[in-house]
Amino acid sequence: MIKQLTSKLSKANNIYDLWFCILMLTASFIIYILPDYVEKQDDDKQTKVYSIGKVLAVENDIMHLGVYIQGEQKLEIEILKGVNKGENISVYNCLNANPQVDTMYKVNDKMLVQLVDLDDGSVIGQPAGLYRLNAEVCLILVFALLLVMVAGWTGVKALLSFVFAGLMLVKILFPLFLNGYNPIFSALIVAALITAAINFLVGGINKRGLVAFFGGFLGLLTTCILAIVFAQWIEPNGMSRPFAKNLLQCVSADLDFRQIFLAGVMIASSGAVMDLSMDISSAMKEVYASNRGISSIQLFKSGMNVGRSVVGTMTTTLLLAYSGGYTTMIMYFMSQGIDSRVVLNSNIIAGEVLNVIVGSFGLVTVAPFTAIVGALVYTKARAKS
């Protein structure tokens, strides 16, 4: 009798998981076909397309300014795809002594080129960087294959959650920022939706997914509140992020870069928060399944013991993840022998300290939040029966 009941519950959960996967797949497709955010330019009547070109010849007119290169390259390229396939055109590559965006081309390089059809029927081109899309697609496919091979059906759900999270950021959150919506509130809503989707996809439509969601969301809410509070003290201006200056120059909306920075703090820590809440929820579920007579207090203590073990490594993970993105900046400060007080007091470093510490605050608080929710949810059904 017990085996039959367990089998029925297992089949029901599998059906719920399948329908939720279909729902998330449909939602991902709808988000994908949403129009991209594009700043409208009524005076731009030219038709622009992108194609692949191969560099046939290079004529350099450049000068070296120390370690920087400035000048121009005249490139003779052959169009490899599209309606202009087989045509040879000349394009000019401007070098502005900015290695972050400049690209030096050589013969036989494949490049992404922007083609513009002029009113007289001629075509001109503009270099758009070395062609890397094939390598990126190959890398993504290898990752997806490895994930499915290792994790099976759970890997498929994890891959779907990965795609959904990426689409939510690119097609929903960032356009909301660009259209002037409140960045912190928008990020909190989007992070909550992503947290729900991932927890219920990976954890299933069950108590484990529910506990992980509420624990993770409470941790995100704590991160949001602490980021706002400590930002009043540290006062980051939000311009320390890459391309913030470029964005300020090109958009017409009155963007609040400080709030965008704080929203990024919450988004950056959300992955670790979800990971920790799922770990604790899964462990508590296994403890309760092994001992149905365990009390709520004992189950809470078990969850906290798991949380203590994981928090120590996860906070360090955040520090290493954030520090890795600023390796060259830290090396620059060290090479110049700048006083550590000046470094820590600078806007960019102070902002990163806020990023790491507030994200770690949210990570630490998610352990008791998840343990409390798990103790209540897992033992509630027994109390009713």
Image (cartoon, rainbow, N blue to C red):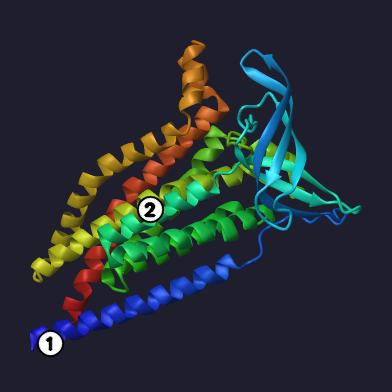
Q: Position of residue 140 (x, y in %)?
A: 43, 53
Q: Is residue 11 above or below residue 274?
A: below
Residue 344 versus residue 237 in the image, above or below: above
Q: Find residue 273 and report its horizontal and vertical position in percent.
A: 36, 52
Rendered residue at 64%/19% (across/down): 68
Q: Nearer the viewer, residue 294 or 282?
A: 282
Chain-order first, disc 2 or disc 1: 1
In the rendered image, residue 48, in percent from the top left (x then y), is placed at 76, 53
Provide the residue designation for mark 1. Answer: 4
- Please identify the quadrant where the N terminus is shown: bottom left
Name the residue located 44 percent from the left edge and 55 percent from the top edge.
221
Tell me the residue at 20%/56% (across/down). Answer: 303
259 left or right of 163 in image: right
Q: Quadrant of residue 300?
A: bottom left
Q: Quadrant of the C terminus?
A: bottom left
What crowding class fits label 1: few (fewer than 14 Cα within 10 Å), some (14-19), or many (20 or more)? few
Disc 1 marks a residue whose amino acid type is Gln
**Which label is found at residue 142?**
2
